[in-house]
Amino acid sequence: MDATSSLAEKMASKTASSNSLDSSSKSSSLGSKHGAENGVLRDTPFAYLEGEEDQDQKNDVTYVCPYRGPVFGALTITNYRLYFRSLPLRDQEPPLVVDVPLGVIARVEKIGGATSRGENSYGIEIFCKDMRNLRFAHKQQNHSRRTVFEKLQANAFPLSYSGKLFAFAHAAAAQPAANANAAAVSAGCDGWAVYEPLAELRRLGVPNDMWRATKLNESYGICDSYPAVWAVPKAASDDFLRRVAQFRSRCRLPVLSWMNPRTQATITRCSQPLVGVSGKRNADDETYLSYIMEANAQSDKLTIMDARPSANAIANKAKGGGYESEDAYKNVEINFLDIHNIHVMRESLRKVKEACYPTTDDSKWQTAIDSTLWLKHIRCILAGAVRIVDKVETMSTSVVVHCSDGWDRTAQLTALSMLLLDPYYRTVRGFEVLIEKEWLSFGHKFQQRIGHGDNKHSDADRSPVFLQFIDSVWQVSHQFSNAFEFNEHFLITIVDHLYSCRFGTFLCNTEAERVADDLKHKTTSLWTHINSSLDQYLNPLFPSFTHGAEPVLRPIASVRAVRLWKGLYCRWNPGLCAPQHGCQRTRELLSKQDQLFKHVNELRLKLNNRSNNMQTTTRLASPMH
């Protein structure tokens, strides 16, 4: 018997415990079968996904765990994941499992050289996008490091090696399961059908007397980073819109994001005007903003929320950008929300990682977190969204939101304020629509910000902009625990698959690119995966205690209310994030409550029946007069 089969038998005799991204990638039994290889079924230590294929396996690798120390075991690399499983030294000892989708990997580095002599000093270090680092030690004499390094490079960064992301292989392999796909579609689980622009506009009451829908950008010729369908003021003709687009950065002119059905106050989004150092004016742009203001009969003012610090907005004039002058734009007030740029946010998250992983100093924990400024940035985003909500809901004033190009901070503010204003976006489907609309269709550059499949880990375009939005949503859900249909697991699943490259949802930079790459037919949507197993993502408090959803949420955006999301950032550090069973316990208590309510209703029914019987008996026994 060779070493490989012996190892497989040892592993198959154990029960797996995995920290993989979702339940479908876990194996309930190590003897799970996967496909056929040369006509022979093979035993595997985990359940392979459709399209997942082995690339390399090493049986003499040591995982240098920062908490348990060096652990000897087997390392498997597929075209989707890195999987390590330890060989327990004692029969009752549970194995240690590391299961990492390759899309999560930011960079891979070799450590040690031919002259390295220290124990576990020769191997590979892996830096991940999800706050952890992994180190694997190899024996120099086995020459196993080179092939592992090459396979990781080729499969974690396929776009840098003329390859394709796993999402395409995953969907292609699943195509023969046509019946299952048809069943999912008929059950309303098809993620690509979640968002339909015209249907969402109709939900908002568009078209109406003041707003219309247009497919002017259907071929993405006016603005290649905008969606095909826009909602714009009815007074603006298509030719007029073309002229307005020329005065906005990247041609991202103001278009509708949301409308208050009661007051007609709106949220529109755009990029900065091209005023430059000389303070250029554009009559069409000025008129267009007046159309947006006049479409709201409740107010004779228009508020512009510029996400940037004022100093940054002024500095952009030197690059041809800038901001609207209150002298040029009549009845307009401008507010700067002091949210910093992508480079500041990237550095802030790097410091959070240093504070949370792998070790922490309890005596300096709070100081370390404060020094990252991460919570300050989250607070600024929340405060900006609350200011937008106040203008739209309390003052009935329409708001225009922009930053520089309108695809980063603008998306954070519009999406978060819409979530606070509209209970629909706090449901599972509504939140999916919100992401599809405000982030995906309006051109947040997911490919550049996340770096899907490329090895340019030091690219200045990378930044945790979308992560900050999800963090902000978690902050609100923490303050309003019964206002959201979804739970924390739902948000973490979205973050995990933001990186995994298993689904097509977050691939590419724009709607135009996704259409050109035919992602709708060549990849699977994350929402299909989530909507086909909704129970695990639902908030048990939502249906039991919400008697009519709160129409508007106003979270506290202060230092005392904003806290570090340990369930996400600290989940790999056992000293900071103990296993959370609160959601399951809540479900159990609510189930018991339902049983008690049912029992109470049964007792009331019996009591009423007994009372009615007694009344009938009394009437029959009464003397006749």
Image (cartoon, rainbow, N blue to C red):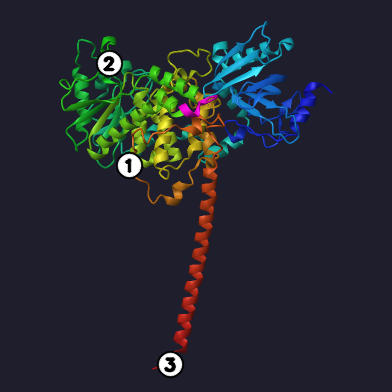
Cα–Cα gap, marks 3 and 2: 96 Å
Q: Residue at x 51, y 19 (%)?
A: 452
Query: Is residue 95 a member of the stretch shown in magenta?
Result: no
* Mark 2 neighbour density, 10 Å: few (under 14) some (14–19) many (20 or more): some
Q: Secondary structure at mark 3?
A: loop
Which amino acid, by three-letter code, is at mark 1? Val
Q: Residue at x 24, y 36 (%)?
A: 209
Task: Give the camera-side residue of 315 and 62.
Answer: 62
Q: Which residue has dot 3 on it?
A: 623
Percent x, y of residue 618: 46, 85
Which amino acid, by three-letter code, is at mark 2? Gln
Q: Residue furthest right?
A: 1
Q: Which residue has dot 2 on it?
A: 246
Q: Which residue has dot 1 on it?
A: 552
* Mark 3 vs 2, N-terminal side: 2
Please, is residue 478 above or below residue 507 in the view?
below
Percent x, y of residue 552: 32, 42
* Mark 1 neighbour density, 10 Å: few (under 14) some (14–19) many (20 or more): some
Q: Is residue 225 visible?
A: yes
Q: Residue furthest front?
A: 363
Mark 1 and mark 3 in contact? Answer it, CB < 8 Å.
no
Q: What's drawn in magenta, residue-wise?
A: 356-364
Cα–Cα gap, marks 2 and 1: 36 Å
Q: Residue furthest bottom?
A: 625
Residue 410: image quadrant is top left
